[in-house]
Amino acid sequence: MDKMSDTMGNWPNAFRTSRLEEADGEGRNPTGNRTMGDIIAARFSRRSFLQGSLAATAIAATVSPLAIATAQDARAENSGSRFDFPEVTAGIDAHHHVAEGYDADILLRWGDKIFADSPDFDPLAQTPEHQARQFGYNNDYVGYIPIDGSSEHGLLVVNHEYTNEHLMFPGVVTVANGEITVSPPDRNRVDIEMAAHGGTVIEIRKENGKWTPVLDGAQNRRITAQTPMALSGPAAGHDRLKTKADPTGRAVLGTINNCAGGVTPWGTYIMAEENIHGYFMGTLPADHPEAANYERMGIPEGTYGWGLFHDRFDLSKEPNEPNRFGWVVEVDVSDPNSVPRKRTALGRFKHEGAQSVVATSGQVVFYLGDDERFDYVYKFVTKGRFDPQDRAANMDLLDEGTLYVARFDEDGTMAWLPLTFGEGPLGPQNGFSSQADVLIETRRAADLLGATPMDRPEDVEPNETNGRVYVMLTNNTKRKPDQVDAANPRAGNAFGHIIEIAEEGEDFAATTGRWEVLLKCGDPSIADVGATFSTQTSANGWFGMPDNCAVDAEGRLWVSTDGNSPKATGRTDGVWAVDTEGDARGTSRLFFRVPVGAEMCGPLMAPDMQTMFVAVQHPGDGGEDWEGFGRPSYYEDLSTRWPDFDDAMPVRPAVVAITRQGGGRIG
Ligand code: FEO
Ligand code: CA
Ligand code: CA
C-alpha cells in the first residue's frame, strides 16, 4: 500500500486512510548518505531510450483512432518485443479489464471460505471467529507452491496486508464537507481486523481450464495477527525482544502488514512485515533506550487503535513489542499447525518482499526492499547451501548468513556492504553490542555504512535466466534537486523508476555488480516528466509508480503498480509487460487493469506460464477524482461494488486468475 500519513494525530481524533499521497513526510533517514550527482553526467539511457515519446504524441494529435491502432499494430510487429497480446486501453471505470483473448476469473474474495466448514460471509454480521476462517482483507503478495510439480494443482499463498474500515464495516463513516471520518473502533471491530490480517494458504486446482479452491485441502490455513510465531536467528532471545507476555524473547503473536513476500526454493512461504508503525500507539517511558530506534521506523503512528484493547500495541505498556515486528516471516506450509518463524537474520525494517534465487554456489540469495523514502535495498545470502534432495536440511537456512545493503555508485558500479557486527562502524563505538543489535536497528547500521538512500524500494526480483535483478522504486516526491544522484535521478520523483542490476559474473551472491536505470516512469509525452519508455510504447503502455513485479520462466518482466489514478496519470493501476532486451528494451504495454480505487498486487505466473494470478487490493478506496463518481467512497456509498456488483455485498479485494481463452502461454 501507499503510505499512511504521519501528519495525523493519534487515534481516535482523525480519520485515517492508507492512501494519502504526501504521507511519510521527508522520510525517516536522518543521514547525509547522498551520492551527490552531477545531473548532466548522470548515466541514463541506452540508444532505445528517448526522452518524451514525440512520435506517439504527434500521431495522437492529428490522426484518427483507427490509424493510431494500425500504427500501434505496426509498432508491435516491428518492435522485437517478447510479448504478443492486444493491449488493454488505459482508463478508469468500476470494472477490471484484461487483454482481449484472455479470461480474468475471480478466484478468492475477502470473506470467502477457506475451509469446508467456514461460515458464509455476511458483511452485516461479521465476527472475529468467522473472519479467522475466511479469506482475509487486502490481498497483496500471491505465491504458488506446486503439488507434485503441477502447474494445475498447488497451494496458493496470499498475504493480507491491512484493513480499510470505511470499506469493510457498515455504519462507521460520517460525512461532512465531502470528507469522511471513521468512528473509533470497538473491541469486536479490532479483533475482526486482526483476523483479516496475515495470510492464507489454500489448495487450488485447475480443471477444464478454470481454477477453484479446494476447501478440504489438508494444508489450508489462515494466519492472522494473533497466530503464535517463533523468533529465530541472531536476534532471537535478546533482551530487546522480551516482553511481559514473553520473557524468552522468542515467542510472538502474529504478523502484520504483510506486503509482498516470496516462495523459497524449498517450498516455504515468506511474508514480509512492512508498515508496522501504524499498529503501535502510546508513549514510551521517559528516556527509554528504544526511542531513537523507534523514531527511525516512525513508531508509533497509532492509526489502527489496536492498543486500546491489546496492551502489546501500546508502547507505555509493552515498550519492546515493536522490536518483534518488521521481520521476514517463514511459514512451513506442509503442516497447517507449524509455527511460523520470524527470521531475524534478514534484518528489521519495512520489508516490502523477499524473492529468492539459488546462486551458483548453492547459497540462496534473498532480495529485500525497505519501503520508505530515502531507505535502502538489501540482500541476504545464506551461509548454508540449498539441498534440492533434502527439504528438511533447508528449513533453517534463513537463520545464518550475511545481510548486505546496496551502495549504487555514480559510475554504474555498485557494492553490497555487509551488515556484520564488529566490522567497520558496526561495533560498540556506535552502540552495537552484538549482531542482534545490528539486526534490530538495521536501518541505522546501513546508514553508518553509507548505503544509497533510494526512492522507496518496493519489489526486488532476480532474473534467474541472466543474473540480473530488477528494483522497483515507486516514487519519492520529497527528493530535492540537491539530493539527486545517478541511481535516483529525478527530484520530486512522482512516478518512480526501475533499476536493473547485473550481479558480477552473473553470480547472485556477488558483493559487487553494475547497474543502470531501466525505466524512468510517467507520461513520456510530457517532456518535463522525463520518462524513458521506448518510442514503441503506446499511450496505454506507460505507467507510474511501479510496486510489485514478476520475472516469468522465460525471464520476461511484468510490473504492477500502486498509485496511478485519474488525477495522477489518468488511468488505474494494472499489470504492464516490460521488455528488457534488445531494441524493444524499455517498451511497455498494458495487460490488465484494476477497478477504480484499487492497486495492483501480485503478479504471479504459474510455472507453466498458462495462468497469471493477480491481487486486486483495496478496490473502491477512492473515487473523488474520477468523473464517474466524484465523491469519497465508503461502505454505504461505493465507487464500485467489484467484484460481485451485488447491492447486498460491499466491494471486496480479490485474487484473479488470468488464463488464455482456449489455453496457452500468457503474453
Ligand atoms: Fe505495501 Fe511497499 O507496499
Ligand atoms: Ca502496494
Ligand atoms: Ca508493495
Image (tube, grey):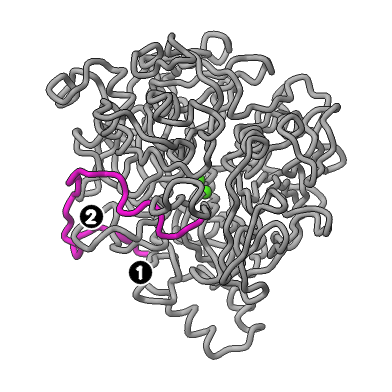
- Look at the magenta stretch and give its main secondary structure: loop
Mark positioned earlier in the residue sequence (1 or 2): 2
Image quadrant assignment for residue 44: bottom left
Q: Residues within 10 Å of mark 2 (few under 14, many from 20)?
A: many
**Residue 76 visible to an observer of this rendering:** no
Contact between marks 1 and 2 (CB within 8 A): the answer is no
Percent coordinates x, y for residue 491 in the rendering:
28, 63
Task: Specify the segment rendered in magenta.
Answer: 19-47
| Residue identifier under label 2 | 485
Work out how far the residue at label 1 is from the one at label 2, CA to CA, in angstroms: 15 Å
The image position of residue 439, as x and y in percent, is: 32, 24
Q: Which one is nearer the viewer's eye here, 566 or 382?
A: 566
Q: Is residue 242 left or right of residue 164?
A: left
The residue at 71%/47% (across/down) is: 656
The residue that disc 1 covers is: 530
**What residue is shown at x 57% (from left), y 42% (from top)?**
162
| Observer-nearest of 656 and 364 | 656
Q: Residues within 10 Å of mark 1 (few under 14, many from 20)?
A: many
